[in-house]
Amino acid sequence: MTAVEHKFTGRGSLTEGFGLSTEPLPLKPYYSREFFELEQKMIFRRAWLYVCRAEELPEPGSFVVKTIHGTGVEALITHTKAGRIQAYYNSCPHRGSIVVKESAGKASRFSCPYHRWTFENTGELLGVPDEENFFQSMDKKNCGLAKIATEVWEGWVFINLSPEPEVGLKEYLGPAKDYLSGILYRGAHNPVVYTAVLDSNWKTASDAFIESYHIPHIHKKTIGTTFASRLNPYSRLIGARPLGIHRTISLFGNPEYAIDPDARVEALGSMGQEGKSVIAADVSEDAVRFRAHPAINPDRSEHWSMDINQIFPHLHIDTGPGSFWTHQFWPIDEKTCFYEVRFYIEEARTIQERFLQELFICRVGEVVLEDLSNLQFTQRGIENSGTGVMHLQDSEVAIRHALTQVLKWTRAQTVKEALA
Amino acid sequence: MSTAADMNRNLPRGFEDLEPFVARWAGETTAERMATRCETDMNDIQAFYEAMLARGEEAMKLIEEFPLDNLPDDVANLSKLLLALAQASIAVELHGQPRAPESPYPNSIRLVRGTRPFG
């Protein structure tokens, strides 16, 4: 029995390794309106929030508009001639109208549709029709688009909604920045994106994506056999570690997974590559380089399937054998969230590759649907729990660590204190 | 010289048996093909699944002869039909019915960006 196999029997010690208590945790943060408002103020108005990859803004003039769900903010994010990526409130300083109606595009300047105030993509106000009829109190220099603090780390674009963030992005990311540094993000320019409005608190949803305990039951048909086997029937984690306020876990993979003989369509897509699954290992040079990164399968386990790197508060960067994908959970209210999953893939070169991608995309859609269906029941139960607490097992350590950070941020008077 | 039959041809020669499926299954995007699968009767899904699967290998070989980013119209239609097979497999091989049991439909899930071509 190898050291890794040993963890699949008896109780593991991941939770102790995180330095966390093993007591039951409160459910109130998952349904209380009051707690939702506290989170909005203490977390979503103070933490650095991931909004998009830099590849969405490939050249000077590129822009995107992102709805920052739950906050009422719409961010206009531009790539300036000087090469800077900067977010602004998409609101005209004249009388507040939306300035840009498109969701993405290319423009070096923007013109408000209401009265044609015109702005540089660096935010400066360039032109005001009938300017002489305004008053001295209207100083054009102070009437540019209002900036939102923006920082980019290795292609990940973050914003911060506090007028003056207490800490910069690098300090905020802390150990996660060093741990994930230098990953080759393959296919970063080509995401396949599913979105859904989920009838659950954002943490209820996020929690469902940081434990594999549910996979053998909820995803039995779609991905159950990929993540569990006789060796590890409950899909226990193969590793987990805290990264400051962030964290990473590694999931088990079934090394014996083979194509089901009834899966005739998958067999058609795999012609000439016998024995590999849809999520099979890619052996290209980039894939090998990607997998060589120390944060990808950090325990170098032969039973590894994927890692989940959870960046506080609501981003998951997941890495598998040859690619990465992200999940994000934006609170809308205490019992609804906006979910977005982005699978980054290389564009297909052959119809066979494209066909396998299509099969993967179809299956992922079914997995999302399984979670969507399941989460409404989780949320309903949470809201009328007789005990008010939840009991977490060792493989659910990421949930425990995540909620602990959420509670800490809602109590901490300063961001420095929340990060400590 | 093109004939009247060619004018009505949506698929490459030799794939005439799949013509009846073009109107319903050759959706332009993955999201359209997904909606088709969710909204089609199981018998019709099964019929398409069997017919397309039987010609799958030949279709893939023929499509391989053309650049994927610049397919002639008839080959493009065949490609879309082939991709729709992935959707049909969800119904036939996974659920045994058009949609996942005990799941709401319509629902809030949107495939807002696919991958080229026909994504």
Image (cartoon, grey):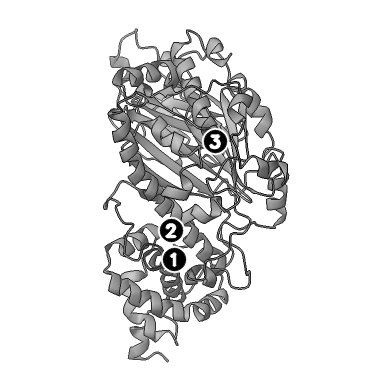
Q: CA distance from mark 1 to mark 2?
A: 7 Å
Residue A48 screen position, x and y as percent: 51, 23
Residue A121: horizontal and vertical position, in percent? Answer: 47, 30
| Residues at circles 2 and 3 in contact by the CB criterion of under 8 Å | no
Q: Image check: A181 left or right of A348?
A: right
Local SS, label 1:
helix
Name which residue type carries label 1.
Ala
Classify residue B29 by image quadrant: bottom left
Give the residue displayed 32% in from the left and 24% down from the top: A129
User: Image height check: is B80 above or below A63?
Assistant: below
| Marks 1, 3: nearer the viewer | 3
Labelled disc at residue A362: 2
Chain holding disc 1: B
| Chain designation of label 2 | A
Residue A159: x and y in percent read: 49, 25
One can see residue A374 in this view: yes
Q: Secondary structure at mark 3?
A: helix
Measured as percent of width and height from the top left, residue A154 is found at 63, 34
Specify whether A111 is left or right of A165.
left
Q: Residues within 10 Å of mark 1 (few under 14, many from 20)?
A: many
Give A44 or A57, whichever is nearer the viewer. Answer: A44
Disc 3 crowd, CA 10 A, few/some/many (<14, 14-19, 20+): many
Residue at the disc numbered 1: B86
Q: Amino acid at mark 3?
A: Ser
Are tags 1 and 2 found on a single chain?
A: no
Q: Residue at x 41, y 73 (%)?
A: B77
Residue at mark 3: A395
